[in-house]
Amino acid sequence: MSDKRFTTLALKEMKQKKEKIAMITAYDYPTAQIADEAGAETILVGDSLGNVVLGYKDTLSVTLEDMIHHGKAVVRGSEKAFVIVDMPFLTYEISAEEALGNAGRIIQQTGAQGVKLEGGTEITAAVKSITGAGIPVVGHLGLTPQSVGQLGGYKVQGRTPAVAKKIIEDTVALEKAGAFMVVLECIPWQLAKVITEKVSIPIIGIGAGKYCDGQVLVFHDVMGLYTGRRPKFVKEYASAREAMLKGVHEYISELKEGAFPTEEHSYTMPKETLAEIREG
Ligand code: KIV
């Protein structure tokens, strides 16, 4: 593990000093390089990989092997960011022992610094087991995409007193179980503010308003690369898809017109060698 990277301690201190923590997802070497160079303190190898990179309709098909494969590339592409890898569906729910084994594989094989799990009180045994082995854990509450079937779709969570109270209780339970950070997705900003003020661990929001200790967005959403569902909380900061499409169009047009490749992009050889090979 590189000692140049942000640590759990440094991230906790950022909360205390009220410095905002930037998190962005990355899935491969170039996206990790960009996120790291731009200054994100944390990079999440999210299982949104399933939607934005692998073309699945949800995150449920993503496997441990997928996460390890992409996690390795992200760690290679980053130097300073604290890299968190999502534990995919059914890799931590079955037993606390299995959760620890799978978290251990992620950390050992990718070189990442932490793992993220979705859920509250029902996963605290897994969180205790993983943190007990010294692996930093991030929780994820609110809209938890691995439970999209049970939640009845990608909807705002915590608008009723019962669900809001459950999200508060779950955050406190995760903190007690040893999680060092929690992501809150798609909940009212007022609820996120209450939670952020209540716990001592950093709260990272996505569709949870501005009062969280930090924010996370999906790389492909930020860059305008994804053509699927675009939630209200997404802000596009670049039109990378447009730029990429234009580039590939131009390449194909120039190729068809004979404008590419030119001498500038070609290698040459001595005349004598050419004569020799022509003579056979
Ligand atoms: O998988 C992911 O990208 C995530 C973020 C949306 C928080 O879990």
Image (cartoon, rainbow, N blue to C red):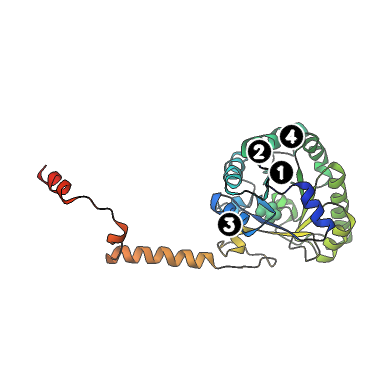
Image depth: mark 2 or mark 3 in front: 3
Q: Amino acid at mark 4?
A: Leu
Q: Earlier in the sequence, mark 1 or mark 2?
A: 2
User: Neighbour class for label 1 at 10 Å: few (<14), some, many (≥20)?
Assistant: many
**Residue in the picture at 32% in, 66% down:** 254
Q: Are marks 1 and 2 in contact (CB under 8 Å)?
A: yes
| Residue 107 horizontal side relative to residue 257, left or right | right
Q: Amino acid at mark 2?
A: Ile
Q: Earlier in the sequence, mark 3 or mark 4?
A: 3
Image depth: mark 3 or mark 4 in front: 3
As measured in the structure, the alpha-carbon distance from the residue carrying label 2 to the one carrying label 3 is 22 Å
User: Callout 1: helix, strand or loop?
Assistant: strand
Give the numbered dot on residue 100: 4
As measured in the structure, the alpha-carbon distance from the residue carrying label 3 to the one carrying label 1 is 21 Å
- Residue under label 2: 106
Residue 75, by quadrant, is top right
Q: Are marks 4 and 1 in contact (CB under 8 Å)?
A: no
- Residue under label 3: 34
User: Callout 3: helix, strand or loop?
Assistant: helix
Return the residue found at the far left: 279
As measured in the structure, the alpha-carbon distance from the residue carrying label 1 to the one carrying label 2 is 8 Å
- Residue under label 1: 115
Q: Earlier in the sequence, mark 3 or mark 1?
A: 3
As measured in the structure, the alpha-carbon distance from the residue carrying label 4 to the one carrying label 1 is 11 Å
Q: How many marks?
A: 4
